Amino acid sequence: MWLGTLLIVLMGVSLGLLGGGGSILAVPILVYVIGLDAHHAIAFSLVLVGGTAVLGAGFHHRNSPLAWREALLFAACGVPFSFLSGIVSRRLAGPLLLVLFGLLMATVGSLMLRPRPEPHEGKRGSPLLFTLAGGGVGFLTGFLGVGGGFLIVPVFILLLHMPTRRAIGTSLVVIAINCASGLVGHWPSLEMQWKLAVPLSVAALAGSLVGVRLSQRFSPRLLRQVFGVFVVILGLVIVLRNLAAF
């Protein structure tokens, strides 16, 4: 339990620092360290990550204004898909969910490692692509129990040309909404153990506060690189650990 709590603190740091990576860490921690099965871990991660994202968004907003309009539009595109995919997810085998999860992480992480200049707001990408991305992230939130930050941040940077720090803070608003929606679809799988939930929630919130403070000290380029390496490595580890099940 002490190791799980420490790792959940690091999950909170990741969420506050990078605007993503929360559930990427939460699901493996809950499965491999705490000992929950995949379906319960995915549902439980939505509680932890969603609550942490709410607090993290508030902290980020104090440092720089968030793009609330874009966040709400993006979340609105994903909410219906998040609810439906949460229902579908319960019908699939746990190892399959984790393999899909790992492959997605490795792909997105590698895209984030591609060098690109820091964007400046003003120019906008395709509204259609923005809508499709919102629906896709919502689907993955309910299907795999991810808040979606590791996809939302790249979308805001690439399609909306949003500065990295603002994209990180704004992504937390979308994560919180998507987690709430996905949790409805996973509700039958959620067996809340308060002796477990309370210390892990406190640990995640404390880590988030530390992450937000750290995000103000690092360059945007370094933040993207750290994010990409972290996601690729953990994705490959999850895939390798679960391929044996097939």
Image (cartoon, rainbow, N blue to C red):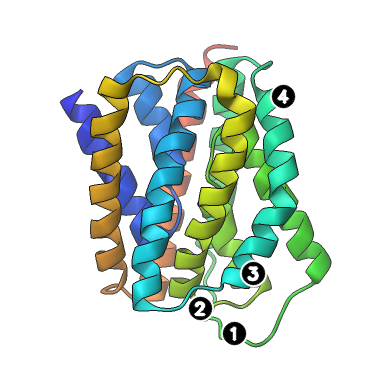
Tell me what residue is drawn at x 74 percent, y 64 percent. Answer: 130
Res. 66 visible in picture: yes
Point out the frontmost of discs 4 and 3. Answer: 3
Q: Amino acid at mark 1?
A: Glu
Indicate the amino acid at tag 2.
Pro
Q: Secondary structure at mark 3?
A: helix
Q: CA distance from mark 1 to mark 3?
A: 12 Å
Image point (54%, 62%), residue name = 153
Figure check: 157 above or below 143: below
**Mark 4 or mark 1, which is nearer the start of the sequence?**
4
Three-letter residue code for mark 4: Val
Residue placed furthest toward the right: 128
Question: Which label's residue is closer to the chain start, 4 or 3?
Answer: 3
Alpha carbon of mark 4 to alpha carbon of mark 3: how far? 28 Å
Q: Earlier in the sequence, mark 2 or mark 4?
A: 4
Q: Is residue 189 left or right of residue 223?
A: right
Q: Amino acid at mark 3?
A: Glu
